[in-house]
Image (spheres, helix red, strand yellow):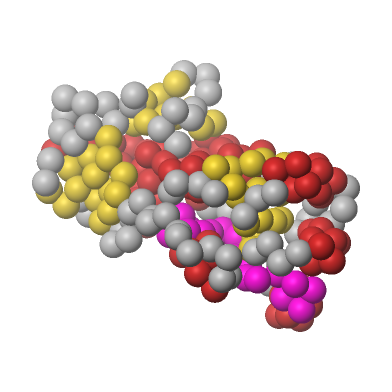
Amino acid sequence: MKVLIVEDDKYINELLSTIVSKNGYEPISAYSGTEGRLLYKMESPELILLDLMLPGITGEEFVREIRRENDTPIIVITATEGKDSMIKLLNAGADDYIKKPFDTEEVMARIGSVLRRNNKFVSVPEAVYILKYENLVLNLEERRVYLKDDELELTKIEYEIIKLLMENSKKVFTKQNLIDSIWYDSYADENTLNVHISNLRTKLNKFDPDIEYIKTVWGIGYKLGV
């Protein structure tokens, strides 16, 4: 089942691609409204994840164009807070929307809900709620973290850091990548990030000192220790 992701932010596009791929869908990435329109006609996706503020044609124009042709499910992902804007968007033909910043679980729950409501789709892949690396296990549904069968007591930020690294196990994150992905609108700098990384490493090392779970890539940032 193909999911067209129309999002001009490269990192968010890659993150959404990873989320849907891990849950059994085939992601198709577009970085402008114009490119999204072209790939839509070429690939005939079963669902569209759509940013609003796009180069080329806007997200709202994209929704209206698609709705003139068919009823492919569309979920808008937006930072817009205005109620009137969301109502206008839904009236234009969007099936649902997700506000940024978003959780993996919310993205998959919205996709599943929209597809189940659409009679053309009778089978929705079961979401992946467990992430595992070495002796470290994340239960995404319950937001619990286990290391060698011991549950770790992590802060919200520590949890988000290790979850992001495990969801993107081959990606090297710059410090700014991590700050932008985890804090979004609230203020944080490299020193703040370094403190959280250090505290997280201390907790991991306490239960499993033989494995480096968070690896420093000198001159760049951090990655999962693979």
Question: Per the image, is 102 magenta?
Answer: yes
Q: Nearer the viewer, residue 159 or 78?
A: 78
Q: Where is residue 15 drawn, in percent x and y?
A: 54, 43
The quadrant of the image that shows the C terminus is: top left
- Report whether residue 179 is seen: no
Q: Is residue 152 above or below residue 14?
A: below
Q: Where is residue 171 drawn, in percent x and y?
A: 48, 30
Q: Residue at x 76, y 59 (%)?
A: 52
Q: Is residue 194 left or right of residue 62?
A: left
Instruction: State which quadrant residue 62 falls in.
Output: bottom right
Question: Per the image, is 93 magenta?
Answer: yes
Q: Residue at x 46, y 55 (%)?
A: 104
Instruction: State which quadrant residue 207 falls in.
Output: top left
Q: Nearer the viewer, residue 177 or 88?
A: 88
Q: Residue at x 65, y 64 (%)?
A: 73
Q: Residue most toward the top? A: 218
In this picture, which residue range is highlighted in magenta?
90-108
Q: Where is residue 111 drawn, in percent x and y?
A: 53, 62
Q: Is residue 46 above or below residue 175?
A: below
Q: Where is residue 27 drawn, in percent x and y?
A: 58, 43
- Report whether residue 95 is seen: yes
Q: Is residue 37 left or right of residue 208?
A: right
Q: Residue at x 54, y 49 (%)?
A: 1
